[in-house]
Amino acid sequence: MRCILLLLLCLSFSMATAQAPHQWYTSTGKKTKFKKVLKHAEKSDIVYFGELHNNAIAHWLQLELVKALQEKGQMLVLGAEMFETDNQLGVNAFLSGEIEADSLGQQVRLWPNHKTDYQPLLDVAKQHGFPFVATNIPRRYASQVFRQGIESLDQLTEEEKAWIVPLPMKYDAALPGYQAMLDMMSGGHGGDNFPKAQAIKDATMAHFLLKHLQSDAIFVHFNGSYHSDNHSKAAVDQPGDGIPWYIHQDRPELKQLIITTITQADLSNLAEEHLHKADFILVVDEDVPTTY
C-alpha cells in the first residue's frame, strides 16, 4: 500500500511540474528510453540494477524491467544484495511455497523496506519459477573485517567460510570506489579495513552470482549503486568497481550491463560528474518522495 501511495505521489508530482519524475541517459549523456535499456538487457549475461535504497522510482523500474524481460520470454535468475547467503534456505522456502511472505522474516534477515521494495521482486520470482539468489556476505563477517581486518576471516570454521568468497580474495585498492573510501578514512578509524569490508561484500556477491549463473538465463542483480558503478564500456580507461570488476577477473567473456540511479534537480542534462558511471543512468528528480 505504501509503495502504491508513493507512486501516486510521484504521478501527482509529475502532473504538478509538467515533467516526468525521471529520465534515462546513456553512459555518454545522451537521453534514451526504457525500451533501449530493455533491448540491451536482453543481450546481456548479467544485468546490475544499481539503486538508491530509498528511491521509489528505482524500485518500480526494477520490477518493470523484470516483468518486461519475462514477457519477452527470457529465462531469468534474480539475486540481491539485500539477502545474505546464510539465509538462502529461507528464501527458497518462500519460493517453493513452504512459507508465506508474512512469515519470511522469521527465517530471513529482512531490510526495513523489504515489504514495499523487495518483496514484489520475490513475488515475481515465485510466480514464474525463477531462482532468487541471496548473494551478500552475512553482515557479521563484513563487520569483522572492518573491526579486525580481513586476515581475521582465516579463523572462521569451514562451515562459516561456505557463506563467503573463497580466501584469499583479490583486492585492488586503486579501484575508484575503494580509493574514495581510503581517502575518506585518511587519518581516521578503520584505515584500509573500511574499503576491504566493502570489497569482501563485492567479492562475495560476485562469487555467488557466478555460482548460480545459468547459460540459458539472464542474471538480474539488485544492489546499491556503489557496488557496481564506474564500469561503463564507454569509458575504456576506467577499470570499473565492485561486483562487475570481480566478475571480470574470473569471467571476462561475460556481457555485463550496468544500470545506476542518481538524483538531480535538473533532468534536462546529465551532470558531467555522472558521465560513464554506468551503461545506463536513471536520473530521478531529487524532489520525488523517498520510501524512507
Image: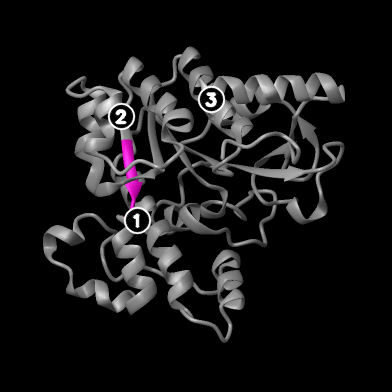
- Is label 3 or label 1 in front? 3
> Label 1, label 2: how many angstroms apart (C-alpha)?
18 Å
Mark 2 neighbour class, 10 Å CA radius: few under 14, some 14 to 19, many 20 or more? some
The mark nearer the N terminus, 1 or 2, is: 2
The mark nearer the N terminus, 3 or 2, is: 3
Q: In the rendering, at what x and y percent does residue 267 appear?
A: 82, 37
Amino acid type for the residue under numbered disc 3: Arg
Mark 3 neighbour class, 10 Å CA radius: few under 14, some 14 to 19, many 20 or more? few
Say whether residue 134 is magenta.
yes
Label 1 sits on a secondary structure element that is: helix
Q: Main secondary structure of the magenta part?
A: strand
Check the image and report above or below for 94 versus 253: above
Residue at the (54%, 51%) spot, across then down: 228
> Residue 131, which numbered label?
2
Q: Quadrant of residue 126?
A: top left
Residue at the (75%, 41%) spot, across then down: 286
> Label 3, label 1: how many angstroms apart (C-alpha)?
32 Å
Foreground pick, 48 / 235: 48
Residue 287 visible in the snapshot: yes
Check the image and report above or below for 1 versus 174: above
Quickly name the residue at label 3: 2
Check the image and report above or below for 96 versus 160: above
The mark nearer the N terminus, 3 or 1, is: 3
Label 2 sits on a secondary structure element that is: loop
Q: In the rendering, at what x and y percent does residue 65 appear?
A: 54, 25
Q: Quadrant of residue 180?
A: bottom right
Left or right, 80 with respect to 33, comes to left
Q: How many marks?
A: 3
Quickly name the residue at label 1: 204
- Is label 3 or label 2 in front? 3
> Label 3, label 2: how many angstroms apart (C-alpha)?
27 Å
